[in-house]
Amino acid sequence: MKNLQTTYLGLKLRNPLIAGSCGLTNSISHLKTLASGGIGAVVVKSLFEEHIQVDTEKVIKSEEGGIKTLTRSSDRLFARRIHDQEEAYAYIYDFAKRNTLEKYLDFLREAKRSVEIPVIASVNCVSNNDWHSFAKKIQGTGVDALELNIFILPSDWQRAPEENEKAYFDIIKEVRSYVDIPIAVKIGYYFSSLAQTVIRLSEGPIEGMVLFNRPYNIDFDIDKLEVSHGAVLSSAEEYNHTLRWISILSGQVKCDLSASTGVHDHKSFIKQLLAGATTVQIASVLYREGFDVIPVILRNTEEWMTLHNFESVDEFRGKLSRKSFENPAVLERVQFMKYYSGIE
Ligand SMILES: Cc1cc2nc3c(=O)[nH]c(=O)nc-3n(C[C@H](O)[C@H](O)[C@H](O)COP(=O)(O)O)c2cc1C
């Protein structure tokens, strides 16, 4: 038996393989299967700011035939008596918001009761609007940490880069004012200076960063002349992008790094650790191959460690990180010229 133990966000994990936030971390039975399969920790499905909005819209739309979504009769009576539309909207909005959150909080409490491994809650947010106090309630459920998935697509041409970036710092500051549990921030890669932004974020009041969120990809259907979408699940070829940035940043940041996107087998799992990742998250491969992939990845990793005489993950973590290179861009430029200019 090899020692795969890892400390991530100050939490003790039996190994660095984490089930990333996705539809498969949304049920207690799945969490139990993930835990019994050997996973190191789970990030539960996110509470989305937008989910709260959608729930609110449902409540408003059903209003014609009575406010069907309000279950308690006192709630219905109260809403009907309100003549002022704005006040009714505010009441219903608050009701919907409370209910969405309550369900999520119940789920987190049950998750904590059901598995022994660390449970990380997740909030997917895009703005600094009125949701941070939820974080305190999330902490109250007993979860071990909170992952904030902040993904602001810089598509607004009127918004300066500094404004977009400031939003990340503002959100973190607000959330930190409500909670003491460890925070990991999951980001995308659309920053004008990715390396500097990651390093500055890592110096803030957080314990870890997850690189990267995989953006929704658009596509076109040329037969229907319609906009469609790209693959929801990643492919095994997509790990290189994260590998580059984990290897560039792992020696520079002031917090843990969790690698995410495109890890489908023990090889890419080991590569992310060699690049310096503290932990590695998987989602798509769980959909593609089922939960049995977890013991396979862990077993193959142990076999690889035996082959290379490593007893613990700490012995090889970061061995191939680029921290020793002053300017990785120069190295990449040379490699690019070497490999691409020769192809005719
Ligand atoms: C079906 C599905 C649902 C997801 N839901 C969430 C989510 O709620 N919150 C989140 O932060 N990431 C979510 N993700 C993104 C994953 O956590 C992960 O970052 C991404 O899929 C890349 O990792 P992978 O290549 O291992 O799939 C979801 C991914 C999938 C495939």
Image (cartoon, helix red, strand yellow):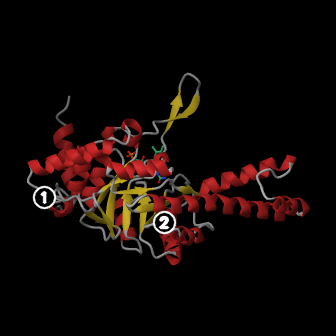
Give coordinates of residue 116: x percent, y percent: 38, 61
Which numbered tag is attached to residue 320?
none
Q: Taking the image as drawn, is residue 121 in sight?
A: no
The image quadrant that residue 247 belongs to is bottom left
Q: Residues within 10 Å of mark 1 (few under 14, many from 20)?
A: some
Q: Mark 2 points at which residue?
A: 168
| Left or right of residue 306: residue 291 | right
| Left or right of residue 262: residue 156 | right
Indicate yes or no: mark 1 CB to ligand 1 under 8 Å: no
Q: Distance between the residues labelled 1 and 2?
A: 39 Å
Q: Name the residue under label 1.
A: 311
- For image coordinates 51% across by 57% down, the residue present is 152
- Nearest the viewer among 322 and 47 is 47
- For image coordinates 80% across by 47% down, the residue present is 62
The image quadrant that residue 1 belongs to is bottom left
Give coordinates of residue 159: x percent, y percent: 55, 60
Secondary-structure class at tag 2 = helix
Give coordinates of residue 306: x percent, y percent: 11, 50
Kind of residue indicated by mark 2: Tyr
- For image coordinates 33% across by 71% down, the residue present is 10
- In the picture, the quarter occupied by the C terminus is top left
Give coordinates of residue 166: x percent, y percent: 49, 68
The image quadrant that residue 343 belongs to is top left
Q: Which residue lies furthest to the top in this view?
A: 223
Secondary-structure class at tag 1 = loop
Q: How crowded is mark 2: few (under 14 residues within 10 Å), some or many (20 or more)?
A: many
Q: Are marks 1 and 2 in contact (CB under 8 Å)?
A: no
Examine the rendered structure and indicate whether residue 297 appears above or below residue 257: above
Q: Taking the image as drawn, is residue 67 in sight?
A: yes
Kind of residue indicated by mark 1: Glu
- N-terminal of the pair, mark 1 or mark 2, is 2
